[in-house]
Amino acid sequence: MSTKRFVILLSVWALSSMVAMGQMRLSVDVKTVQVASGKKVTTERSLYLNPDGRLVAEQHSPTHLVTLSNSLGEVRIYDPATNQLAVMNDKQMASSKELVAMFASGSYVDMALPLYGYRQSDSRSEEGVLIKTFTPTATSAIAKVELVFQNHLPICMIYLNAKGTPIRKLYFSRYNYERIPMPMRITEIEYTSERDSLVRLSTYSNLLFDADASSEMFDYKVPADAIRTEVDPKTLFGK
């Protein structure tokens, strides 16, 4: 098959995937291992994405938590052990910014950077890859983000400061092409100082679609007698 024909077919496939996403639901398991300052923390979750953008995330370990979010950033975090419910409105936690939702909707073309206040300012080709540059629209410690594509799919994101020094890198690999292009392995490195860094490895498995994604968790509802708490919901993830 010629390169030109391959590119055309890939573009048609990507477009059809984006159109179909309005009627698709999916589930996937995620295991994240984080290493920082010599300490290792492992988190295991299952994600359930509904066609309307409602996302249910069940954290199995290190503690059991259920998070419900939507594309508007309305978030509820429920702790079954204590029957406590934390509620918040945070656009940074909108379901559309979850990696699975990005790839399901086709927004991997810019990795939702415009939603974080970035605009594309440049693009260039180097050694078989396309590099898109995004710059913040407001004052930020991050001067620019470089998003690297190979075969129309992101393989790397690099966050740089004003000196051009990388402060964060993400690598996307082991793509699954069953219904959507989905990286099943993501490696993230945050350079917290000149000598220290945080490394986070996320591996995805058991990716299911539509009828195969038949878990009751898609329709999960927080118990009516759940106790509202004023605890910052973000602290619950560190339990």
Image (tube, rainbow, N blue to C red):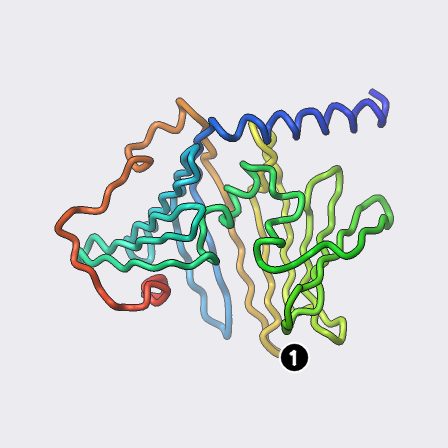
Furthest residue in direction top, as rendered: 1
Front in this rendered view, residue 213 or 30 = 213
Badge count: 1
Residue at horizontal 66 percent and vertical 30 percent from the top: 14
Relative depth, front residue between 78 and 34? 78
Q: Which residue is mark 1?
A: 194
For the point 80% across and 55% down, the residue is 122
Name the foreground residue: 147 vs 143: 143
Q: Where residue 174 sits in the image (x, y, percent)?
A: 62, 41
Q: Is residue 74 left or right of residue 205?
A: left
Where residue 105 sits: x, y (%)? 55, 37
Q: Amino acid at mark 1?
A: Glu
Residue at 36% from the left image edge and 62% from the top image edge = 237
| Outermost residue toward the bottom in this view | 194
Name the side, left or right, on which 28 lies relative to 133.
left
**93 in relation to 2, above or below:** below
Task: Please give the name of the residue rendered at 42% of the width and 53% of the height, measured from the top-left corner.
Answer: 73
